[in-house]
């Protein structure tokens, strides 16, 4: 039994922050129904995309048809959460917006996720991860060599941490409040605002001092040699020795004791960094990790995706699970990150090209005759 057992989520989004949010809610035990569209052909994602829709059901409705819209609203009567990621205003035009759903279920928690929010001068803008990172200052704040463009992150930071996680946090808070006051809520999650909240150290510093924030000069930027990445003989090591005791341990073990008292001496950073760089190239990455990681130095290896996926530390923490797909067979994937909840060694994945129409509608007390009529009308697939 999951921590969210008994919670039903209707997810109108197939990709992006909303899809990540519903996937995490499913991992914690919520019953998630992915509500797709009949308007356009939906490509079937590979079994590994979005963890293969683990723990979800699927149904396709024509929300533009009166019977399809009514079907969705009836499903909402038994639901706890609705998540959508249409352009602002679309759900209202379709007749499935918050006010429409609230009229059927006053306790509904309705979460809209969008790039720039439901209101404001950018609300109508189209966008993707790179755009939200851009307007929130993330790209400009990422340090780069002189004259180079802002580097792009290797993962969808905005969709995941700025949008999906913020949506989950807001949904859980609203469900907790509903348990006390009985009222539902409307949640307006803007991905760009979520990214801005991740920039709090830099933004708050600027707001407090009025001074510009140069890339790499924030508290955890690469202004200081104690917080940087260094090339070893065959790879890279990450150093995060911010505290004086960790810095002293590092300097002692790599033979740079002369820099212990100069950790935050701005005038000496180039010299310190050069000395550290010279020391680290003398041994392999794993040799340095074996020497330093367990000695309170805040040193870790820079692992590739392939290495991280098979890292012993991940397996020990039950980070990888086996999943069985109806057509692809057995695949391995990241297990749910269930802090405080039970994990399983294996999971089953749904066929995302199929539909759970009968099961979903029957659960909402549609009769066999009603289901047959909806199929005949083309309102459901």
Image: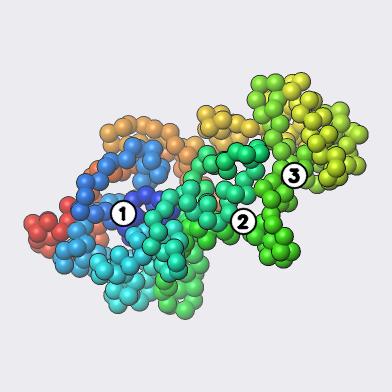
In three-dimensional space, the C-alpha distance between marks 2 and 1, rounded to whole angstroms, equals: 32 Å
In what element is the residue under mark 2? loop
Numbered tag placed on residue 347 in the rendering: none
Query: Which x, y percent locates residue 183?
Result: 42, 77
Circle 3 SS class: loop
Instruction: Estimate the x, y position of residue 124 in percent, counting from the top left.
Output: 38, 62
* Residue plotted at (75% across, 34% down): 294
Q: Which residue is mark 2?
A: 199
Tell me if mark 2 has few (under 14), some (14-19) or many (20+) residues whose alpha carbon lies within 10 angstroms of its own. Answer: some
Q: Nearer the viewer, residue 166 or 158?
A: 158
CB contact under 8 Å: marks 2 and 1: no
Residue that badge 3 annotates: 223
Q: Earlier in the sequence, mark 2 or mark 1?
A: 1
C-alpha separation, residue under disc 1 versus residue under disc 3: 46 Å
Numbered disc 1: secondary structure = strand
Gap between marks 3 and 2, in whole Å?
17 Å
Query: Colour mode?
Result: rainbow
Asked whether residue 101 appears in the rendered view, the answer is yes
Q: Residue at x 29, y 74 (%)?
A: 100
- In this rendering, position of residue 279 left or right of residue 262: left
Image coords of residue 334 (percent x, y): 47, 39
Mark 3 nearby-residue class (10 Å; few <14, some 14–19, many ≥20): some
**Which residue is at the far front?**
147
The disc placed on residue 34 is: 1
Sequence-first disc among 3 and 2 = 2
Which label sits in the foreground, 2 or 1? 2
Considering depth in this image, is 231 or 213 the residue closer to the camera? Answer: 213
């Amino acid at each position: 039994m999951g921590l969210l057992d008994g919670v039903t989520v209707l997810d109108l989004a197939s990709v992006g922050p909303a899809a990540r949010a519903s996937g995490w809610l499913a991992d914690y035990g919520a019953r998630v129904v992915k509500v797709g569209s009949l308007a356009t052909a939906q490509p079937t994602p590979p079994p590994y995309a979005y963890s293969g829709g683990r723990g979800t059901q699927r149904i396709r409705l024509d929300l533009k048809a009166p019977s399809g819209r009514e079907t969705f609203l009836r499903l909402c009567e038994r639901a706890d959460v609705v998540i959508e990621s249409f352009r602002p205003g679309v759900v209202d035009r379709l007749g499935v917006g918050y006010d429409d759903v609230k009229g059927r279920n006053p306790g509904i928690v309705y979460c809209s996720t969008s790039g720039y929010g439901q209101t404001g001068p950018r609300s109508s803008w189209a966008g993707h991860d790179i755009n939200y990172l851009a307007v929130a200052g993330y790209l400009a704040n990422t340090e780069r060599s002189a004259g180079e463009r802002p580097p792009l992150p290797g993962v969808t930071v905005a969709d995941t941490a700025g949008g999906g996680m913020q949506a989950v946090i807001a949904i859980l808070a609203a469900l907790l409040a509903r348990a006390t006051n009985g009222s539902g809520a409307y949640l307006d999650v803007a991905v760009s605002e979520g990214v801005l909240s991740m920039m709090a150290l830099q933004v708050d510093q600027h707001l407090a001092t009025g001074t510009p924030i140069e890339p790499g000069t924030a508290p955890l930027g690469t202004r200081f040699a104690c917080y940087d990445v260094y090339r070893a003989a065959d790879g890279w090591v990450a150093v995060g020795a911010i505290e004086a005791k960790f810095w002293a341990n590092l300097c002692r073990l790599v033979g740079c004791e002369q820099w212990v008292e100069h950790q935050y001496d701005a005038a000496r950073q180039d010299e310190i960094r050069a000395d550290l760089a010279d020391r680290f190239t003398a041994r392999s990455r794993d040799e340095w990790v074996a020497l330093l990681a367990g000695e309170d130095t805040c040193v870790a290896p820079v692992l590739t995706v392939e290495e991280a996926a098979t890292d012993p530390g991940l397996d020990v923490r039950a980070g990888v699970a086996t999943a069985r797909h109806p057509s692809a067979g057995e695949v391995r994937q990241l297990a749910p990150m269930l802090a405080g909840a039970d994990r399983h060694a294996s999971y089953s994945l749904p066929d995302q090209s199929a539909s759970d129409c009968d099961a979903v509608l029957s659960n909402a007390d549609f009769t066999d005759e009603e289901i047959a009529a909806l199929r005949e009308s083309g309102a459901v697939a």
